Amino acid sequence: MADNQFTFENEQFRSTYWHTCSHILAQAVKRLYPEAKLAIGPSIANGFYYDIDSPTNFTPEILTQIEAEMRKICKEKSKLERFELPRAEALELMQDEPYKVELINDLPADAIISFYKQGGFTDLCAGPHLDSTGRVKGNAVKLTSCTGAYWRGDEHNKMLQRIYGIAFPKKDELDAYLNAQEEARKRDHNKLGRELEYFTTADVIGQGLPILLPKGARVIQTLQRWVEDEEQKRGYLLTKTPLMAKRELYKISGHWDHYLDGMFVMGDPEDETKECFALRPMTCPFQYQVFLNRARSYRDLPMRLGETSTLFRNEDSGEMHGLIRVRQFTISEGHLILRPDQLEEEFAGCLELAKYLLDTVGMLDSCTFRFSQWDPANPNNKYEGTSEQWEHAQTVMQQILDDLNVNYEIGIDEAAFYGPKLDVQYKNVFGKEDTIVTIQIDMLLAEKFGMYYTDADSQKKLPYIIHRTSLGCYERTLAYLIETYAGALPTWMAPEQVRILPVTDRAADYAAGTRSALQADFRSEKLGYKIREAQKDKIPYMVIVGDKDVENNTVSIRHRSGEDLGAMSLADFSALLKDVVDNKKKL
Ligand SMILES: [Zn+2]
Ligand SMILES: [Zn+2]
């Protein structure tokens, strides 16, 4: 093996290391809790876990004791020795471990049944592992949490306890990792966004259906007005179309065949004798009716339709996460209906708009681009159209992306069912990636909806369609903004831009006269306390009004960063604020 195969950057070595840790974890648990029954213990993307059936509740205190036992096992430097057994003997060896017995029974008849032994502990496993427990650095192992997990992920099975852990070859690497996780947790929008009262959830409403509180709703309103204005500047026509339609519409669009599981259907989808409605998962077939409203000629194209559109998608409950994975969301949807010769220019326009918006909100630098293609090996059930149509659409799109110098990765089997996509990807604080903006080329749906235009040669022709978003889903964007700025949103989009902090009663009267639309903190608390509160609420500007300010007809300005901007006239402060807001500065 080459040297670098034993470095932690090597994915295979890392997973072998972590998998060995899960054996050490299991051995430690069995020593301390011999009655515990072991299920499975793999390495994962970020460490390892072991699922255990135990009457003892693995509290954080107990996890600390298990960690100490793991350190002992590392010091013992036991060799990990592999051996194989015929099925009957394997079952006998594991007779006290019911989950292992079930696993063995599920192995195919000709499977090799292998075990690994370290000291007095043996586990059913295919390997590979490090050759000794001494290879694991005992003081750089951390058990991070314990959660419930159903045996084999099936809710009909027993709920087991899953102990998660992480380990590194060096203690300082572990410390750096744990610090980074701690920082990420502080920025996590699902925690911070609730603390700052941007959004909440209610069991009685349901999972994946966040409630935007006044502050969150205000940010989204600011973004939405801005996006609609920017689209109007670029020739978009605003539409407002229904949130639901009969099944017949989705049958034409293909959603009924390709996306039914992801839709909220009202009524029995099977019963053709009754009307059946479904909430919309996408805006496309609704906006096409705008084009179909009257006969169209080549002069009508490109037609750029935009809509601030609320959509519904029945995500799995396990997928739900704060504002990032939700069942109802509002998105800057749009469809451009165009002649084939307009495709490249219009695609470039969509990309320009998305980049401009993402850059202005401060997210573009952390975005990556994915050219999402179909999977030629899986063409029939998931995708509409023929191989030739897909090859054509993807070739055209690749040419456009190359012309525009887009630096993309390719995602196979990530396309929409009607065409390839350029997906702009963003990562949350924990490194999980999702799509923030998408631009898609569709050469199929116009035909299904009979969307023809009369060309200059008087021939009826089918247009191409671009499906696109410009700032994506507002809820998700808000989540990323909270995480990107750790809650301290730039002033222009902050729900509360300025707070007035009067120092004395005399100043309070003066402040009351100056505040107009601004919020003021009139509580008779100490100034230091009010400043700390305003900083905790991430208010960009604090207007401090003291007796001197009353005399001089000034206000004293502090920025949330701690910077003291000193005393200035109210007019000067208004001008400063106007500049920061109008120019969308990242202050
Ligand atoms: Zn193993
Ligand atoms: Zn669409």
Image (spheres, helix red, strand yellow):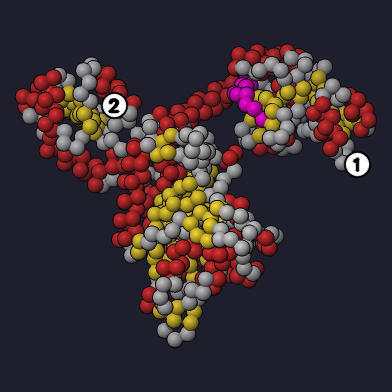
Q: Residue at x 48, y 46 (%)?
A: 328
2 or 1: tag closer to the N-terminus: 1
Q: Residue at x 48, y 29 (%)?
A: 185
Residue 398 can be seen in this image: no
Cα separation between marks 2 and 1: 68 Å
Q: Which residue is mark 1?
A: 110
Magenta-tinted stretch: 139-149
Instruction: Tell me where residue 115 sits by quadrant.
Output: top right
Mark 1 Cα shell of 10 Å, populated few (<14), some (14-19), many (≥20) = few
Count numbered badges in the picture: 2
Name the spot of residue 258 as percent of width and height, x first: 61, 58
Q: Which residue is mark 2?
A: 534
Q: Residue at x 44, y 51 (%)?
A: 310
Name the spot of residue 128 as percent of width and height, x first: 77, 33
Three-letter residue code for mark 1 = Asp
Please, what is the dominant secondary structure of the magenta stretch? strand
Q: Is residue 122 magenta?
A: no
Residue 87 can be seen in this image: yes
Instruction: Tell me where residue 525 sits by quadrant.
Output: top left
Quarter that holds the N terminus: top right
Q: In this image, 585 relative to 303: left or right?
A: left
* In-front residue for pair 186/247: 247
Q: Residue furthest left?
A: 551
